[in-house]
Image (cartoon, rainbow, N blue to C red):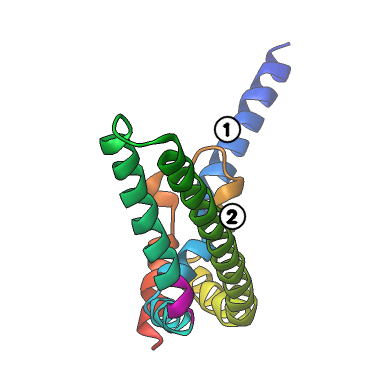
């Protein structure tokens, strides 16, 4: 019986030592890429290319805010027809706002996906170099980790390397 207990204790110690020797990290590759200086520049280009739609969306948002204020401020003094006209204008501008908002959101999603796919080989190469240099045994996607210690997160290191590659 003592031999079995000693054997179990030895196995437990070996497992604990092996687990301690494993160097594990987590990384959010997408976050690192989209926070990088190069991507921030590309985002400015995206915004410049879609400036008309962005300006239209901002203008609609301001119009909706002004109409809302007008409704709240003058609702007691408006005729039924005036209230109906303002309500219709508000609904029309609201639908237009939603249209442009959805359009820009889809364009941005597509742009993000294309950029990520285009940059993925370079991103993986940079990450591989970081893994080799630091000697990590296991690197997990940050979204897959249930818990991660801030010291195990190498996203910032990856971001710094991406910015240094300029």
Quarter of the rendering containing residue 108: bottom right
Q: Which residue is mark 2?
A: 141
Pick the quarter of the image with the N terminus: top right
109 and 78: which is toward the camera: 78
105 and 66: which is toward the camera: 66
For residue 51, say whether it is visible. Answer: yes
Residue 20 point in image, percent of width and height? 51, 44
For residue 27, say whether it is visible. Answer: no
Q: Does label 2 or label 1 sit earlier along the sequence? A: 1
Provide the major secondary structure of the magenta segment: helix
Q: Are marks 2 and 1 in contact (CB under 8 Å)?
A: no
* Residue at disc 2, secondary structure: strand
Picture layout, residue 96 above or below residue 81: below
Residue 7 point in image, percent of width and height? 69, 25
Marks 2/1: CA–CA distance? 29 Å
- Residue, x 42% and y 61% (percent of image)? 60
Say the numbered circle drawn on residue 13.
1
Mark 1 surroundings: few (<14), some (14-19) or many (≥20) residues within 10 A = few
Left or right position of 84 against 150 = right
Say whether residue 62 is magenta: no
Pick the quarter of the image with the C terminus: bottom left
- Residue, x 39% and y 52% (percent of image)? 64
Left or right position of 147 against 161 = right
Magenta range: 50-54
Say the numbered circle drawn on residue 44.
none
- Residue, x 44% and y 70% (percent of image)? 56
Outermost residue toward the bottom? 166
Foreground disc of the pair 2, 1? 2
């Amino acid at each position: 019986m003592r031999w079995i207990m000693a054997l179990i204790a030895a196995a437990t110690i070996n497992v604990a030592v092996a687990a301690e020797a494993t160097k594990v990290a987590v990384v959010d590759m997408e976050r690192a890429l989209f926070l990088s200086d190069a991507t921030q520049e590309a985002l400015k280009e995206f915004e410049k290319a879609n400036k008309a739609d962005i300006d239209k969306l901002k203008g609609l948002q301001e119009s909706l805010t002004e109409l809302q204020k007008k409704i709240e401020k003058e609702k007691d003094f408006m005729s039924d027809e005036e209230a109906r006209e303002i309500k219709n204008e508000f609904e029309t501008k609201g639908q237009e706002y939603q249209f442009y908002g959805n359009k820009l959101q889809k364009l941005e999603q597509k742009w993000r996906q294309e950029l990520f796919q285009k940059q993925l080989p370079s991103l993986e190469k940079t990450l591989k170099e970081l893994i080799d240099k630091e000697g990590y045994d296991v690197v997990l996607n940050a979204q897959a980790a249930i818990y991660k210690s801030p010291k195990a997160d190498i996203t910032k290191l990856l971001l710094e390397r991406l910015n240094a590659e300029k």
